[in-house]
């Protein structure tokens, strides 16, 4: 692309996961929201928004996030499912304008698409659990397959020059390094990487691995960031990660609008 680009023109994306908000946490995220308002154009939340999936916890978090002055979108994590109230949680967050993604996408300023899923575990590469044997094993594997298919559909519909992915579980093993290897299989699944590498993305953000590693890449080189808040606080003394993405040139935007930017999915 030869398009002229204003060198100062980038979209500042704040990303964080694993807020684990409790019903006693009034005020805990006030400073976080203030900093996001000052430093970012958009906030992405990568699951485990609540500590036990209670509606009261979501109400407290929604109250905190109501001070946001930038758009926000989120996926849920495993903790948000603990009480079986995930729909109610999403409703509380949506009341304050947080767009909750589950196999769908959010479009920021007509140029940046964010596809989101929760994801699931099952392990990586040759060590991934296979759908063989007991029905319970097959059901476990199927959840990761379903999440991967949801992400594939969401990315497939995003015909935009810039794309980001948010999920709770990790699509690669590199960003969970630091966790106990005995639990690697429960922290993510390489099945989630397949649609990312098939359709392409500018970056992926996930949480869940509180003791993992901040940065890695997919097999095809897409940057992946583990933005679990406890990890960012420990390693960077920060509560969110800021990713800068160049605003696309006019040529890139028009190319995409004509449908020529669509990428075919591999087998
Ligand atoms: Fe977590
Ligand atoms: Fe989690």
Image: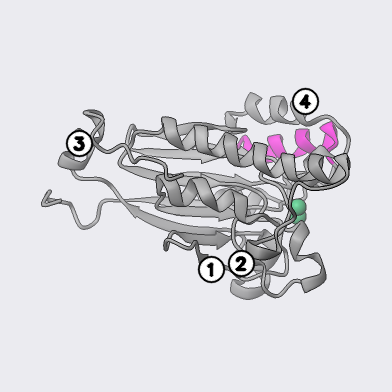
The residue at which mark 4 appears reads as 88
The mark that comes first in sequence, 3 or 1, is 1
Q: Find residue 215 and name its label.
A: 1
Tell me where residue 207 appears, x and y as whole percent: 66, 56
Between tags 3 and 1, which lies in front? 3
Mark 4 residue crowding within 10 angstroms, few (<14) / some (14–19) / many (20+) = some
The mark that comes first in sequence, 3 or 2, is 2
Q: Is residue 247 above or below residue 240?
A: above
Residue 38 appears anywhere in the view: no
The residue at which mark 3 appears reads as 255
Does the residue at mark 3 contact the one at mark 2 (Cβ under 8 Å)? no
- Alpha-carbon distance for marks 3 and 4? 40 Å
Q: Main secondary structure of the magenta part?
A: helix
- Alpha-carbon distance for marks 1 and 2? 6 Å
Tell me where residue 102 appears, x and y as whole percent: 62, 33
Does the residue at mark 1 contact the one at mark 2 (Cβ under 8 Å)? yes
- Res. 108 image quadrant: top left
* Chain part drawn in magenta: 53-70
Q: Find residue 175 and name its label.
A: 2
The mark that comes first in sequence, 4 or 2, is 4
Between tags 4 and 2, which lies in front? 2
Instruction: Name the element at disc 2.
Output: helix
Instruction: Name the element at disc 3.
Output: helix
The mark that comes first in sequence, 1 or 4, is 4
Instruction: Name the element at disc 1.
Output: strand
């Amino acid at each position: 692309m030869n398009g002229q680009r204003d060198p100062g023109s980038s979209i500042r994306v704040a990303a964080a996961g694993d807020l684990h908000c409790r019903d006693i946490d009034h005020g805990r995220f006030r400073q976080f929201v203030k900093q996001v308002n000052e430093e970012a154009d958009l906030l992405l939340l990568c699951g485990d928004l609540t500590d036990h999936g209670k509606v009261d916890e979501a109400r407290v978090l929604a109250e905190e996030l109501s001070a946001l002055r930038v758009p926000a979108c989120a996926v849920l994590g495993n903790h948000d499912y603990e009480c079986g109230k995930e729909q109610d949680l999403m409703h509380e967050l949506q009341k304050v304008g947080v767009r909750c993604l589950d196999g769908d996408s959010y479009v920021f300023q007509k140029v940046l698409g964010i596809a989101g899923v929760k994801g699931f575990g099952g392990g990586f590469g040759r060590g991934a659990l296979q759908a063989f044997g007991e029905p319970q094993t097959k059901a476990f594997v199927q959840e990761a397959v379903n999440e991967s298919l949801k992400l594939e559909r969401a990315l497939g519909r995003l015909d935009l020059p810039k794309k980001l992915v948010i999920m709770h579980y990790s699509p690669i093993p590199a960003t969970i390094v630091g966790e106990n290897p005995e639990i690697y299989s429960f922290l993510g699944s390489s099945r989630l990487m397949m649609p990312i590498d098939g359709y392409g993305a500018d970056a992926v953000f996930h949480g869940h691995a509180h003791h993992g590693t901040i940065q890695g890449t997919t097999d095809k080189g897409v940057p992946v960031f583990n933005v679990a808040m406890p990890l960012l606080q420990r390693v960077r003394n920060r509560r969110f990660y800021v990713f800068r993405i160049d605003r696309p040139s006019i040529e890139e935007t028009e190319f995409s609008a004509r449908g020529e930017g669509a990428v075919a999915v591999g087998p």
